């Protein structure tokens, strides 16, 4: 191909991606339809990100998906009365072009494949959400909720609750939402309403409330009712502590973004969210590591059966550690986080059994905190009931990542060059590094990357939706 043809090809792809953007935005805002390409979200994606998502299709199916081949599917989708679902136009397009030679059947094909979503009655009411705490997870949850702004959005971020309230606090909180050293700038505009103590982000009006205890707030004074309170502080982890939230007028349910104690259900979205019942007032979204490893452990156990195993977490440092050596109540965590690898404990392996009881007593775990600010890895060493090899294990988990009920939790990479910083912003619970897989006989060792901040926050949003009975289909099925 000549140099001019390369440029012409790029120009064509760029223009096609630009033409997609307004259709993608309207589909989400007006109909609640989120469009993806083999799991890669196109909501608020740049033209370059749309082009890249199409290039990645070759890795999954061994063949190209050109934008001119997928664009008719976005057009057809925009004409259908589809509501409240996630639609993978990558899969739809690849499957269609394997069967048909021209575009004449696209609209009929889309109507058949999306029939369940077309007949879906949008009866769910929008629900209020309050973020109690505005640290790393709280701010990322805010970004995820705000990016879904639109008339079809069912999760409405109404308030954040903070301790303090000193002069200048509001602007500093807004600044931390605008700028993030790990995840980059906020995609949009953030304003401060000093007079009414609020932050306005992309048109979302967020009341800022100051309180020192969960039971001090009357949400109804701010027009908030029947709200789901997401506790990001990690201070309260049992029913007595988290139950304080339910004493606040306007609060109806509580979700903890950390492992819970006692009888509170620990839920890993994609694995055991069906355990959540309407009468459950307090639920835990478990830990980032438990979310990263449980879907893959479920997939492996379903096919091979797990006898026992060990999980070693190579985890980025967190705010719980010290920048320089100082007192800490936990062993070793007082030593400087940016300067040391720190061996510490993790309850993630044992916590897996709360979401996947079949693995009760079968796993041990430990953790090493390392001098990186985000993205961690779990090394999962397993003894299996059945025999396997590297190719078979990788092909099976690749299929789980693309075609199974766990496709929104498990991602897969066969890159020989990928490193931790490449996974910043991953929306998956865990990403299998297939190049590192070791499998022989009845033993296997799996290396699973995970963005312990953003990927976990995406899992939390899934639990939020389930708690509020906001159920979204992923299409096509399989």
Image (cartoon, rainbow, N blue to C red):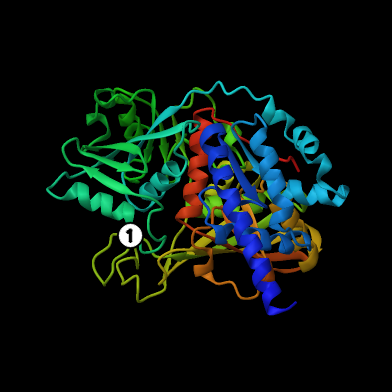
**Disc 1 residue crowd, few under 14, some 14–19, many 20+, Cα 10 Å:** few
Hey, which quadrant is residue 6 in on the image? bottom right
Residue 31 in the image: state x and y as whole percent.
57, 32
Query: Which residue is drawn at the image coordinates 72% and 64% (left, top)?
Result: 59
- For the residue pair 362 and 32, the one nearer the viewer reads as 32
What number of labels is visible?
Answer: 1
- For the residue pair 166 and 370, the one nearer the viewer reads as 166
> Can I make out residue 145 in this image?
yes
Please indicate whether residue 246 sits to the left or right of residue 467 in the image: left
Residue 365, placed above or below residue 416: above
Residue 163 in the image: state x and y as whole percent.
21, 43
Hey, which quadrant is residue 433 in on the image? bottom right
User: What SS does tag 1 mark?
Assistant: loop
**Which quarter of the rendering shows the C terminus?**
top right
Residue 376 in the image: state x and y as whole percent.
50, 64
Residue 444, placed above or below residue 429: below
**Which quarter of the rendering shows the N terminus?**
bottom right
Please indicate whether residue 329 sits to the left or right of residue 268 in the image: left
> Can I make out residue 306 in this image?
no
Query: Which residue is drawn at the image coordinates 81% and 61% (left, top)?
Result: 387
User: What residue is disc 1 on?
Assistant: 319
Query: Which residue is drawn at the image coordinates 75% and 46% (left, top)?
Result: 92
| Residue at the extreme left | 167
Residue 27 in the image: state x and y as whole percent.
57, 38
Residue 315, placed above or below residue 24: below
Residue 63, placed above or below residue 198: below
Hey, which quadrant is residue 78 in on the image? top right
């Amino acid at each position: 191909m000549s140099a001019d043809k390369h440029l012409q090809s790029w120009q064509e792809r760029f223009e096609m991606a630009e033409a997609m953007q307004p259709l993608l935005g309207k589909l989400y805002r007006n109909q609640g339809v989120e469009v993806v390409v083999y799991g890669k979200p196109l909501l608020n994606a740049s033209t370059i990100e749309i082009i890249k998502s199409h290039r990645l299709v070759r890795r999954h199916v061994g063949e190209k998906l050109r934008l001119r081949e997928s664009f008719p599917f976005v057009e057809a989708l925009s004409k259908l009365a589809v509501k409240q679902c996630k639609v993978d136009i990558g899969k739809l397009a690849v499957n269609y072009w394997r069967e048909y030679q021209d575009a004449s059947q696209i609209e009929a094909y889309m109507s058949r494949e999306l029939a369940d979503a077309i007949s879906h009655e949008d009866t769910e009411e929008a629900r209020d959400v309050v973020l109690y705490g505005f640290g790393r997870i709280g701010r990322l949850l805010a970004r995820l909720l705000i990016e879904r702004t639109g008339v079809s959005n069912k999760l409405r971020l109404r308030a954040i609750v903070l301790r303090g309230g000193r002069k200048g606090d509001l602007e500093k909180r807004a600044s931390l939402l605008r700028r993030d050293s790990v995840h980059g700038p906020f995609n949009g505009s953030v304003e401060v309403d000093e007079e009414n103590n609020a932050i306005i982000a992309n048109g979302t009006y967020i009341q800022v409330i100051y309180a020192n205890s969960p039971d001090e707030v009357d949400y109804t004074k701010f027009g908030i009712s029947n709200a789901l309170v997401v506790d990001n502080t990690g201070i309260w982890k049992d029913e007595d502590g988290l139950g304080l939230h339910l004493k606040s007028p306007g609060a109806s349910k509580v979700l903890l973004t950390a492992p819970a104690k006692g009888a509170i259900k620990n839920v890993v979205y994609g694995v055991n969210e069906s355990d959540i019942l309407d009468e459950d007032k307090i639920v835990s979204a478990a830990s980032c590591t438990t979310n990263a490893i449980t879907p893959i452990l479920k997939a492996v156990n379903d096919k091979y059966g797990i006898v026992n195993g060990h999980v070693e977490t190579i985890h980025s440092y967190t705010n719980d550690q010290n920048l320089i050596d100082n007192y800490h109540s936990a062993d070793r965590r007082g030593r400087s986080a940016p300067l040391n690898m720190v061996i510490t404990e993790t309850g993630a392996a044992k916590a897996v059994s709360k979401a996947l009881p079949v693995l009760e007593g079968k796993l041990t775990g430990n953790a090493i905190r390392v001098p990186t600010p985000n993205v961690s890895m779990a090394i999962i060493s397993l003894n299996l009931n059945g025999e396997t090899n590297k190719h078979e294990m990788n092909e099976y988990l690749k299929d789980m990542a693309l075609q199974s009920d766990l496709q929104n939790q498990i991602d897969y990479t066969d890159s020989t060059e990928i490193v931790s910083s490449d996974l910043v912003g991953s929306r998956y619970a865990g990403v299998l590094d297939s190049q590192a897989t070791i499998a022989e006989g009845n033993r296997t060792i799996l290396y699973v990357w995970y963005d312990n901040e953003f990927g976990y926050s995406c899992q939390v949003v899934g639990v939020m939706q389930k708690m509020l009975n906001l159920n979204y289909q992923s299409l096509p099925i399989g």
